[in-house]
Amino acid sequence: DDWPTASSPDREMLEQLMRCVETALKKELTGRGGRQGAWDVYVAATTEAARTAVVEALERQPNRPRKVLGFKPVLNRRESMGAEDAMVEALLISRADVFVRLVIGSSGFSTFAYLSNALRAQNEWVAGMPSLERSGAMPNYLVTSSCGEGRCFLASPEVRMARISWHGKQYTQRSCGDPVVRVEHR
């Protein structure tokens, strides 16, 4: 995972994030007739300073969200409650229509983003709530300072997986067979 190099975005990064959000809204949420409806946003961050800065920037926008959602999770992911809060955020984000990420000081690889996209295929936990069921890839926009200034680009929603079979049959063969071979033959 890439880790942020600052506790919150500077003014230029926030401005770029707002432009990227506007681009994503126009491209992904504009309906027939060219009209964009009301929209909500969920803000997840690794620091309280970053969360506050993004929420304040969103609330200053002329086309601001109807609701800014979020909760104050335990940000230390090494604590049990922090890891659970990260999973809750990943589940919530997996139901989004668009995912816009701001990454400070790195290229933007994130296992959290890949987890959110992978969870999108899991609809069992929202059974009985069809409005929350999702399928297919979620548009995944990324703003980062290390890939060129003023950039907002679509990142791949595809989940990169480690190939466990690389380790050899001694690690994948079990008493009930080889689960990797079984999955590959489906």
Image (cartoon, rainbow, N blue to C red):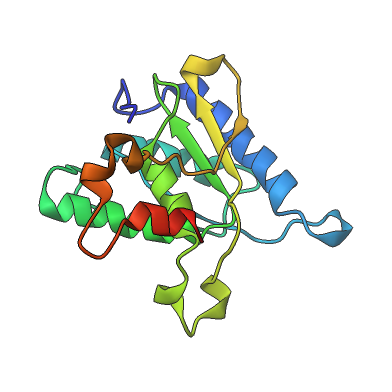
Residue, far right: 33
Q: Quadrant of residue 62?
A: top right
Residue in view at x 40 percent, y 53 percent: 181
Residue, far bottom: 128
Q: What is the quadrant of the N terminus in the image?
A: top left
Residue 118: image x %, image y %?
A: 45, 53
Q: Quick check: can you spot residue 152?
A: yes
Q: Quadrant of residue 182?
A: bottom left
Look at the picture and state if 38 lies above or below 79. Answer: below
Residue in view at x 46 percent, y 57 percent: 94
Residue 117 as seen in the image, left or right of residue 149: left
Q: Quick check: can you spot residue 42?
A: no
Residue 151: image x %, image y %?
A: 60, 22
Q: Looking at the image, which is closer to me, 65 or 116?
A: 116
Residue 184 as seen in the image, left or right of residue 136: left
Look at the picture and state if 130 lies above or below 149. Answer: below
Residue 37 as seen in the image, left or right of residue 186: right
Look at the picture and state if 88 lies above or below 170. Answer: below
Q: Looking at the image, which is closer to me, 90 or 23?
A: 90
Look at the picture and state if 4 lies above or below 90. Answer: above
Residue in view at x 73 percent, y 45 percent: 27
Residue in view at x 63 percent, y 33 percent: 19
Residue 14: image x %, image y %?
A: 49, 29
The number of discs equals 0
Residue 137: image x %, image y %?
A: 59, 52
